[in-house]
Image (tube, grey):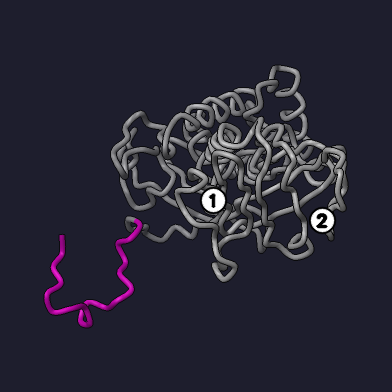
Amino acid sequence: MPEGDAVLRTARRLHLALAGRPLVRTELRWPDLGEADLAGREVIEVVSYGKQILTRIAAAEPAGRIPRIPTVPPEPLTVRSHLRMEGRWYVHARDAEPWPPRNRVSVRAVLGGAVWTAVGTWLGMLDLVPTAAESTLIGHLGPDIMADDFDPGVAGEAAKRLAVDPQRQVGAALLDQTTVAGIGTIYMAEALFAQRVSPWTLIGEVDVTALLATARRQLLRGVTQASPITTGNPRRGLDTWVHGRSGRPCQRCGTVVRVAPIGPPLEERPAFYCPTCQPGPTPTDDGRPRRPLGANPSVPEDRRPIDYRRS
């Protein structure tokens, strides 16, 4: 699932392409939204909040003709999209590609402007609400860790939310978007590694302010990169300290990096960590050896193609 840095990068790209111009043609291919027509309205801005993308659209101009039916409220509106696991928005010049056909099932939204067209594919969420009612969609979320106004006061609010239950595991608390919005499994693991804290450490034993500052710094750096690079080394496999590196040596101490689930039942997420650099509890790690990711081919040794060779 894309994390806050990728979502902010996407929102900025959509803003540059659409903001300040009217929409020429639109389609929201989503239940209950299929007939919504936003053509003729100006896009005010596109912003992110945590992992949410908010496309804010101006009120409709008074029409001198019969409005299109069915219509949407004339007040300012917000299109909320969430990428979830596979969603993405891409932008192309208005006439560079044909309008996506109706049978292209991956397309969930198309916002066609005068110059650029934005296409949302495999979106996990799509909503259309009055801008004044945005809080019904995001009001339950914690402070956006990447927001410009994430100053000491807002950071203090996030720290307070994290510390409500001092017996909660810090890794699970960071992934809870109602405490602080924008952190996913990558930056949970990388920020905790940088702070030398086990993901299963109780939140009451952690310097939450320092941890949030580290996560925010890593996320903001990620906005400027095509993919997360927390080590400073862009080479594939060396770009993160622990995330995605189970079975490989820690780049700091050489201990084998491990992975185990964290979070409440049915909502577990993978937590990568180095047991030497991040000493502390590991209650969900079964202790069995971990091989590098991808080191266990699904095809048995004796059933591989005859020309298969180990690299």
Whether residue 241 sits left or right of residue 282 in the image: it is left
Depth check: give the residue in front, 251 or 216.
216
Answer with left or right where residue 37 lies relative to residue 187.
right
Q: Can you identify the residue that label 1 sits on?
A: 88
Q: Which percent across, then down, holds residue 6?
A: 53, 40
**Residue name at image x 37 percent, y 57 percent:** 290
Residue at the spot x=50%, y=31% of the render? 223
Question: Is the C terminus in the top left, top right, bottom left or bottom right quadrant?
Answer: bottom left
Location of mark 2 (residue): 68
Front-lying residue, 32 or 85: 32
Q: Amino acid at mark 2?
A: Arg
The first of marks 1 and 2 along the sequence is 2
Q: Position of residue 123 (x, y in %)?
A: 61, 56
Label drawn at residue 70: none
Q: Residues within 10 Å of mark 2 (few under 14, many from 20)?
A: few
Residue 296 in view? yes
| Residue found farthest to the bottom | 303
| Magenta span includes 301 | yes
Does residue 198 appear in the picture of this structure? no
Mark 2, secondary structure of its residue: loop
Give residue 119's position: percent from left, percent from top.
56, 51
Most foreground residue, 123 or 211: 123
Q: Position of residue 23 (x, y in %)?
A: 67, 43
Q: Amino acid at mark 1?
A: Arg
Q: Which residues are magenta?
A: 293-311
Residue 31 vs 278, above or below: the answer is below
